[in-house]
Amino acid sequence: MADQPELHRGLMNVYMDTTESSFIDGEIGKLLYRGYDIHDLAEKSTFEEIVHLVLYGELPNQAQLDETDGYLRANRRIPDEIITVIDAVKSAHPMDVLQTALIGLAAFDDESEDNSREANVRKALRLTAQAPTIVTAHHRIRSGLEPVSPNPDLNHAGNFLYMLFDQFPDDETIALMDVDFILHAEHGVNASSFAARVSASTNSTLHAAVSGAVGTLKGPAHGGAAEEVMKMSMEIGNPENAEEYARNKLNNRERIMGFGHRVYRAEDPRARHLRERSQALGEKRGDPRWFQILTHLSEDVMAPYRDRGIYVNVDFYAGSIYHLLGIPSDLFIPIFALGRVPGWSAQCIEQYQNNILLRPRLHYIGPMDRDYVPIDQR
């Protein structure tokens, strides 16, 4: 047998290609979209600007932003046939419904098979616009309610909240959801982006690649932390219970959800922006205990683990925000997906532009050259 090759299990720290979409320095907790610091973008930009930036490579001027925003607003509706499909699978997990509906949209997109850069940018914008309509329509249908039609007078975040609750959200809530979408828009070649790029490398369609990314994000090792953090907070119940809860978990070698990241060895730079907003929203809603529980965990119980590079990640505070907004816990991962559609699309567009089939190998360690034994002699 040949010598054993060097294995890179999990492909950790393996660079498979170059990118211009985003930059991550996990040692110092730095994240850039197209060269722009996430802190500046979260505090000064809008999701519509980020969509343009991620897909076109530059921040838009006013005319460009108006065009991108107008295109998004004009392409939010989904065909009645997709509503019928959603109704047929309404008992499924929202991520499964989103994946099913996204790939179904290919049947109604005249550019589905066109993998030119220009067509893929247009498709990326349409998928970004349509994904919230899918998620909200499904939630309302499974709740015995009629889907709410998109409102072209609202921005992307405001329209999502409007379609979900059938109520006009206030400006503060819209701004909060807008920042959440910004923070989730792009993050390099994580598991779901890698899945999308593998699909794109076969020259499959953008619809197929993005739906594959949705399926990958559903996995609890990737996208499920926000929901798990909220479940953990409910189990803790009160801030004074946090330390005992965490000690029991750690003594049993169980994870404290929302801590640690595959890339970051410093605090996830996105977490700061949700921390501040989780606190403000809790105070506004008269229910600060969730933030108090999370703060006790991060600042007291888990602080000693920072020396090992274990800090809170972006999902740590997200669940408390969604919960306080009245969003069901099984929609936490779909919200992550709604923000990430532009990033997945940008990763695919890069793959298409300088394509090579992504085909790693596995090192075989099983038996060799065995003799076949007829079934009556086994």
Image (cartoon, rainbow, N blue to C red):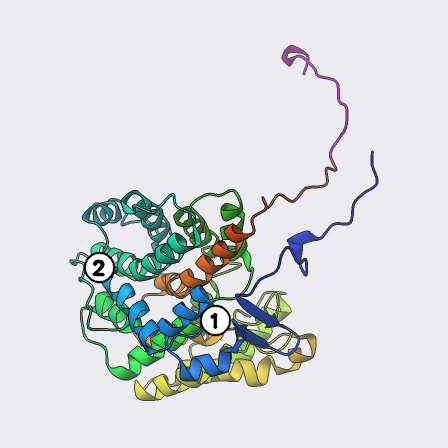
Q: Residues within 10 Å of mark 1 (few under 14, many from 20)?
A: many
Tell me the amino acid under the disc marked 1.
Asp
Label for residue 140?
Answer: 2
Separation of residues labelled 2 and 1 (CA atoms): 25 Å
Q: Is residue 289 left or right of residue 296?
A: left
The foreground one among 134 and 291 is 134
Q: Is residue 78 magenta?
A: no
Q: Is residue 39 left or right of residue 279?
A: right
Q: Which residues are magenta?
A: 366-378
Give whichever of discs 2 and 1 has the lower sequence position.
2
Instruction: Give me the residue at 49% from left, 43% from top.
Output: 203
Instruction: Give me the residue at 41% from left, 72% from top.
Output: 50
The foreground one among 37 and 214 is 37
Residue tagged 1: 315
The foreground one among 33 and 230 is 33
Instruction: Give me the residue at 22% from left, 70% from top.
Output: 162
The foreground one among 33 and 170 is 33
